[in-house]
Image (spheres, rainbow, N blue to C red):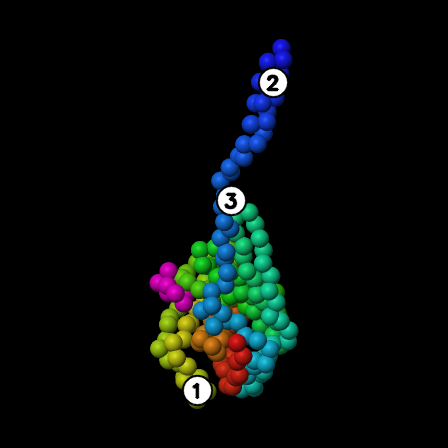
Amino acid sequence: MRTILLFFFLLTIFTGCHKIVYPPPKPKELDSIPVEFKAWTLFQPGSYWIYLNEGTQVSESTFIKHGPYFYQWSTEYSITDYTWYFVDNPFILKYDIQGGGERNTVLQLWTWQMDDPVALTIKTIEDPANSDFSSSYIFTYELIEKLDSLELNSHVFYNVFHTRCTQKKNNDYSIIYDYYFMRNVGLIKFRRLYTYENKDTTWSLLKWKTVQ
C-alpha cells in the first residue's frame, strides 16, 4: 500500500512540475492609417482654406476648430485607428479618417446634415483601378479621374484625384458629392448636386495654408 501511495506521490510531483507549452497567441493585425494617406487628409491647427462659392461669387473661409483626436478600437483580431477633427466650414462639419482592414483606409467628410459620405480612400491613391466600392446600402464611392493638373482661380494644382460619392435618398433622387484632392493641400474643390431639385453648388480653393 505504501508503495502504491509513493508511486502516486512521485507521479504528481513530476507531472506537476512539467511545464505545458501553449502556442503563442496570434498577433493582432494593426490597421494603422498609412503615412501617405495622412499627407492627403490629415492637417493640424493653423491650417486654413478659403474657397470661392462659384454660384454666389462669395469667398468662404475654413479652418480647424478643434482636434485632431486619436482613438484605437481593439477587437480580438485587429486594431483600427481613428483620427478626426472638426472644421469651421460652410459645407463640411468633420474630417473622419478610419484605418480599416486590408489597407482600406477611408476619409469621410461629415456634412451639416449629418451625412458621412466617403471622399477618399487609400486604394484610390495606391491602386486607382480598383478603388470603387459601396460603403453602405446608400453610399457608392468611385474614382472619376486622375488629373495631371487642374487650374482653379489662377492656381495650378498637380496630380489631382477627382472622386465621387453618390447618396441615394430614395428611388426618386440622390445627392452627388464630387471631391478634388491634392497631396499636402487637401480638398481643393467640392461640388454638391441635389438631383431632385437640380440644385448644384461648387466651391473651389482660392487661398490656403496647411500645417501637417
Query: Looking at the figure, which quarter contains the N terminus?
Result: top right
What is the distance, in whole Å, between disc 3 and disc 2 at their CAs? 38 Å
Q: Of tags 1 and 3, which is closer to the observer?
A: 3
Of pointers 3 and 2, the one earlier in the residue sequence = 2
**View extreme (bottom): residue:** 154
Residue 107 is situated, as x and y percent measured from the top left of the image, at 51, 66
Mark 1 vs mark 2, CA separation in Å: 92 Å
Chief secondary structure of the magenta portion:
helix
Q: Is residue 154 left or right of residue 112?
A: left
Find numbered disc 2 in the image and state the secondary structure of the residue it sits on. Answer: helix
In magenta segment, residue 200: no
Q: Which residue is mark 3?
A: 25
Q: Using the rendered image of the protein, determine whether residue 176 is visible from the camera's viewpoint.
A: no
Badge 1 amino acid: His
Rendered residue at 58%/67% (across/down): 84
Q: Which residues are magenta?
A: 124-130
Q: Residue at x 57, y 65 (%)?
A: 83
Specify few, some or many for label 3: CA neighbours under 10 Å numbering under 14, 14-19, or 20 or more: few
Q: Nearer the viewer, residue 34 or 19?
A: 19
Percent position (x, y) of residue 27? 50, 49
Residue 171: x, y in percent?
51, 58
Residue 159 position, x and y percent, is 38, 76
> Nearest the camera: 35 or 135?
35
Residue at the location (54% across, 57% down)? 80
Whether residue 184 is visible, yes or no, is yes
- Report the amino acid beneath label 2: Leu
Q: Is residue 22 above or below residue 48?
A: above
- In the picture of the structure, the residue carrying the numbered disc 1 is 155
**To which residue does mark 2 refer?**
6
